[in-house]
Amino acid sequence: MSSQVRLQLAEQSITPEERSIVPLIPPNPNVGVALTNIQGDVYPTFPKKYEAFIFFAITNANAFRTDLGRFKPSITTSADTIKILTEIQKVRQANIKNKTAEVAQVPNQFNIALSHLALALLNIGDIFDPNFNKGMFSDAEALGDLPAASSTPGNYSPGWDQAWRDPKNPIHGVILVASGDPDSFAKGQALVKSSFSSSIHVNFVLNGKVRDGSMKGHEYFGFLDGVSEPAMNGLVKPHKGQLTCDPGVIIHGLVGDESLRRRPSWALGGSILVFRQLQQFVDKFKQFCKSQPFPLNDKTAEGEARRGAKLLGRWASGCPLDLSPLHDNTTIAEDPEQNNNFTFSGGTDLASCPVTGHIRKMAPRVSRALDSSELPKHMIVRSGIPYGPELPEFGGPPGDQDRGLLFTSYQSTLSNGFTFIQEQWANNVNFPFGQDLDGTGNRPLISNGPGYDPIIGAKPERVLNTPNGRSRFIRGENPGNLNDSIPIAQDWVLARGGEYFWVPSLDAVAMIASNKPMPGKGSS
């Protein structure tokens, strides 16, 4: 790994013991993979203040293999990341005990991932994921991404930024650089570019930064992010109520990987990275909350905040609406043994989390809408970061600015993970299926479907350029008539582009670098 740099503890978004993903030390030996063979942002995800995503095209395949072999020692493994988190925690505990303000010594962190185009270029076999093999561009219509101006029914093209759809500069891969301070951040990016100077063309770089002060760990709508990560069995120490899944749901070749028998042996320890550049229209979101406070006669700031909590399913602090339905509760939010200890099965009034609440759409937990054995296979691990300037009220520049989230998720199978969640849950007006208000069967059904995920849900007509194509709705909040709908006329989140990437294990990186045969399973 690279030389160590200083990282101020005060700059970290979440301390190790407060994370959703707390590594189990040592891991269960039955997991069946060495932590030195998994890239560190897959598990347990990078601690970071700054992060760069360097998107590149391979210009010389043989030179790329050589450069990759030389760069391999710089790739941060799961074992490395766990050491970083352990060191941070040791220093923090010493500071508390000794009333000191020492800093933890942590290294820059690097990961690398390849698109389906790169696998074809490098003669790497099939990892057996149909969505990955097509690329995100082919999935954009099903994901609900807005069309390009030239799109017509039957001839769809996503309205992404040109950099994401430029045939002259195909995206073969991405290199992640995570750092704790701006100086090391710049040096880390320079190291990557110099390491591959003879073999890649850098198409573009997207930079993210954790927000400062009271907004640390929050996305731009103002809500604490990363609270609901799943705990992988045998690798993560779960908090109370935390959703769990088998490690193969995230990592190839392990227990829970539904395509285990179809994957080649060299895929063991890899994962699939979803990257999405998501612009957030903060003013539109805030205007909606102001115009639709909850309840409607509460025109106070708390009424606006309560509407935001209804849309997300959590208060801005991260406190679940189901545990504190009327007011935010930072005590619950800050306690990792409480902030996921709920099921959506409680609540006897309309103050609890609606069935269209974002976190309920993304993971319905205990619900009549989904068998409990089904939910774990749809888990994903997220590790995104905000991008763009800070909001004006927190010292940022005035006027409209390009800001949002550099969304990342890891899963072993896209059709169980990201694409399933977006298409079958977020975009599906009828999901949760046959759901009543509180999941107990004691209330009338919402007969016409609860509606879309209000944050990322997409209406199918949106891709047809119809006059009302952007309109969506949510239901289930009027106690007199659960089928009353609240229209959402504008997008609050816009996909600017994205791609699927294979995150190879360290063993697979070595095979690519040495040009060893990597056929798909069953290939000669």
Image (spheres, rainbow, N blue to C red):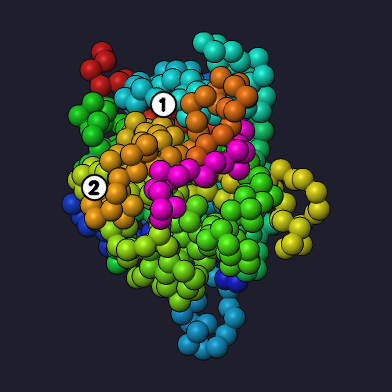
Q: Which residue is mark 1?
A: 132
Badge 2 crowding class, 10 Å Cα cut-off, few under 14, some 14 to 19, many 20 or more, is some
- Residue in view at x 20 percent, y 29 percent: 261
Residue 457 x %, y %: 48, 38
In the rendered image of this protein, does residue 465 appear above or below residue 414? above
Q: In terms of secondary structure, where does tag 2 sit? A: loop
Name the mark nearer the viewer: 1 or 2: 2
Magenta stretch bounds: 475-496
Tag 2: residue type? Arg
In the rendered image of this protein, does residue 97 appear above or below residue 130? below
Residue 328 x %, y %: 50, 70
Residue 314 x %, y %: 46, 60
Q: Which residue is mark 2?
A: 368
Tag 1: residue type? Phe
Q: Is residue 85 left or right of residue 337?
A: right
- Residue in view at x 47 percent, y 73 percent: 329
**Visible in this render: residue 402?**
yes
Of 185 and 399, nearer the camera is 399
